[in-house]
Image (cartoon, rainbow, N blue to C red):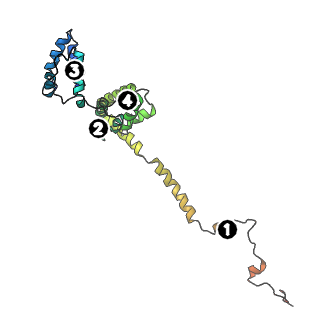
Amino acid sequence: MTYYTGKDDPVQHVQWFEDVVSIRQMSDAFKCRLFAITLKEKARDWFHQLPASSIYSFEDLRRGFLLRFSTSKKRKKEAECLFAVRQGPEETLGHYVDRFQEEILLVQEVPGYALMLAFTLGLRPGFFSMELKRVPPLSFEELMERAAKEIDFERANPAFARKLARLAEDDVKEPVVGKQREQREPREDRRREEPRGQGQQHGGGQGAKQPTGLEASGGSPPGPGRTSGKR
């Protein structure tokens, strides 16, 4: 028998009691007396302090009990807590699924698409996560079914599953962007090392200055009264 002392969740205790008494027909008066047997310490003290003729049905007792111990009720976590669940570096998929499902029971109602997003983001990079990206599941139920098949495969073929996981992790870690950057850098270095006057030596535009005969011979232009030729 489960006893309630006033420290645990009263809703869970009432649900447990109703499940027990539902197996057979019994009057409200008998339910109230039977419910009192499941109380201990502060909860039992509360029951014996109830005013006379204040309880007319089990529903009255149930409502008063939940109201009195409402501060002991477990509060549901926010859905954001699911996004904090992460698969460890050495954690198996089966253990991660168990932890994630246990966390679901502690949070408020969460839509299916949020459950799928939180689960896939928490997965360690590997073969299964790549498969989910390649063929996304349509529902959380489908995601759990595929996870169960992957768990069965890992348990039946542990060595091969570890090999696939290593190959998938290496593929994810390969720096593709870094390789492209390394290929571009030599071209930029060659442009920086190019001489400044290289373009002027080969370029002959319309504005290029043509050397005159005097400039080529190193002479100076004739002044007034002077001729360039010999007499």
- Who's the residue at 75% across and 75% down the image? 211
177 left or right of 216? left
The image shows residue 219 at horizontal and vertical percentages of 75, 84
Q: Residues within 10 Å of mark 4 (few under 14, many from 20)?
A: few
Residue on which disc 1 sits? 200
Residue type at the position of mark 4: Val
Task: For mark 3, give the secondary structure.
Answer: helix
Give me the C-alpha separation between circle 4 and circle 3: 24 Å
| Label pair 1/2, CB-CB below 8 angstroms | no
Residue on which disc 4 sits? 110
Establish if 220 lies above or below 88.
Answer: below
Question: Within the image, what quadrant is residue 165 found in?
Answer: top left
Give me the C-alpha separation between circle 3 and circle 2: 34 Å
93 left or right of 2? right
Tell me which numbered mark, 4 or 2, is placed earlier along the sequence. 2
Q: Residues within 10 Å of mark 1 (few under 14, many from 20)?
A: few
Give me the C-alpha separation between circle 3 and circle 1: 93 Å
Badge number at residue 49: none
Residue type at the position of mark 3: Trp
Q: Residues within 10 Å of mark 3 (few under 14, many from 20)?
A: few
Give me the C-alpha separation between circle 4 and circle 2: 25 Å
Give me the C-alpha separation between circle 1 and circle 2: 66 Å
Q: Residues within 10 Å of mark 2 (few under 14, many from 20)?
A: few
- Say which quadrant the C terminus sits in: bottom right
Residue on which disc 2 sits? 91
Residue type at the position of mark 2: Glu
Residue type at the position of mark 1: Gln
Q: Nearer the viewer, mark 1 or mark 4?
A: 4
Tell me which numbered mark, 3 or 2, is placed earlier along the sequence. 3
